[in-house]
Amino acid sequence: MLDLPTPRILTVTELTRSIRGILETELPFVMVNGEISNLRRPFSGHLYFTLKDQDSQLKAVLFKTQQKYLREQPRDGQQVICRGRISVYEPRGEYQLIIDYIERLGTGDLQVAFENLKLKLAQEGLFDQEHKKLIPQFPSRVALITSPEGAALYDFLKVALHRFPSQPIEIFPVRVQGKEAAAEICAALAALNRLKRSDIIVLCRGGGSIEDLWSFNEESVARAVYDSDIPVVSAIGHEIDFTIVDFVADLRTPTPTAAAEAVIPNKEILAEHVERLKLKLSKTVLQQIQEKRHQVVYQQRLLGDPRSLISHNFMYLDNVYSSLVYGYKDFIFKRTMQIEALSGRLHKLSPIQQLAFKQQWAGELTRRLQSVMVQQLEKKKNRLAAATNLLDAMSPLRVLGRGYAVVRSGPHEKPPGALVRSTKQVNVGKDLEVILQEGKLRCEVKEIKKDGRDERI
């Protein structure tokens, strides 16, 4: 008889682990349609429920980290389509579905809407290659429109930091899922185009269901990407995921990591490329210098020694200078002789002599006139003095000086200021003004004597 090998005896754990390995290997990705039942959420926050149909049921779990991509919370009795992988929960020996995402049955309507919008925009030419803008090879700044809490952001930054640590990256935080996500994405695109400080815009989001990614299937977002003056790179979902934005964008990358590799230059590769260019430039410059040197030598042979030309020109310059100096001196001498001859003739005919004579004659006449004026002035002074003495002798003031006075009627009499020469001109009580040598007197007539008779008041 043949001795058959004794079969290896497995423990329950080993068997269960083997079954799990087979299931995870043979069924790495499945999509299951069923009804939710026995839904529960323990303290951990994970969702545990059963998917069932008329004949069978399947344990399922949706971990807390995947629930942020849900548009609505699952409920008992819902018909859903689940995407995930089959595994075995070893402590109980139960196989279960570990879910990546859930979409309600009927999301086929979203796929129809997706295809309709895709056809409409394609007919309008939004997907045409001629409208695609070139992606700068060395962007000065990269703008990242994404959720600040998503793993896609960290995947992108990790690759960017490795490839080019000093690359400026500006993050515009937006919602990438939900009703308000599309409006925020459009606003971010408009703001970046208005600021004009970035060379590339990257729309970045992790994978999910068609509902999770629907913000990037909105017509408003697609048109905002098309209208952008700055090149737009889409990095949405996984490699198998497609959105409308992927078709409109200037460049579609399958993942955020691939987007970072596409838009962020590799520092090491650039350094090698620069080094090669430096060597090529040095070689080219040296070659150009050598060629120019040969040209200089050839031109020197044709030109000869320029120093001999300089010497010749110096001698020519000396001759020209000597001729110029001689000609200038001769010209000056001739002009000087002409000026002297003309000066002699001008001196003979010059009015200066006549002017000097006239000035002498005018001086003599001035002296005579002054002498006559002095004599006339002296005569006039003498005559004036004689008239002044005569006038002084006849002046009433001179008489007043000897004790006499001038009597006039007072200012209130009629006529006022009339000289009084006789007693007949006055009456008792009349107002008189008596002018003395020094000052005046106001008097009233008290008594009048006429021919020895007295008239009293």
Image (spheres, rainbow, N blue to C red):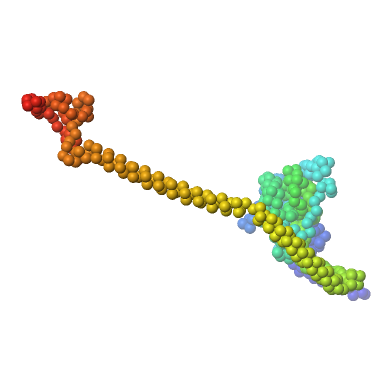
Residue drawn at point x = 26 percent, y = 40 percent: 392
- Residue 268's image quarter? bottom right
Residue 7, given in percent of the width and then of the height, sits at 84, 71
Question: Taking 323 as reference, is 380 above or below it?
Answer: above
Residue 103, given in percent of the width and then of the height, sits at 74, 48
Left or right side of 337 for 301: right
Question: Taking 16 as reference, is 401 above or below it?
Answer: above
Question: Taking 395 as reference, is 325 above or below it?
Answer: below
Front-most of residues 404 and 33? 404
Residue drawn at point x = 87 percent, y = 71 percent: 296
Front-most of residues 446 and 169? 446
Residue 335, given in percent of the width and then of the height, sits at 73, 60
Left or right side of 153 for 444: left
Residue drawn at point x = 57 percent, y = 52 percent: 357
Q: In which quadrant will I find the N terminus?
A: bottom right
Residue 435, given in percent of the width and then of the height, sits at 19, 35
Question: Taking 145 as reference, is 326 above or below it?
Answer: below
Front-most of residues 327 and 89? 327
Q: Looking at this rendering, what residue extends furthest in the right direction?
A: 1
How many numbered discs, if any?
0
Residue 387 seen from this side = yes
Front-most of residues 440 and 390? 390
- Residue 427's image quarter? top left
Q: In which quadrant will I find the C terminus?
A: top left
Residue 90 seen from this side = no
Residue drawn at point x = 80 percent, y = 70 percent: 318
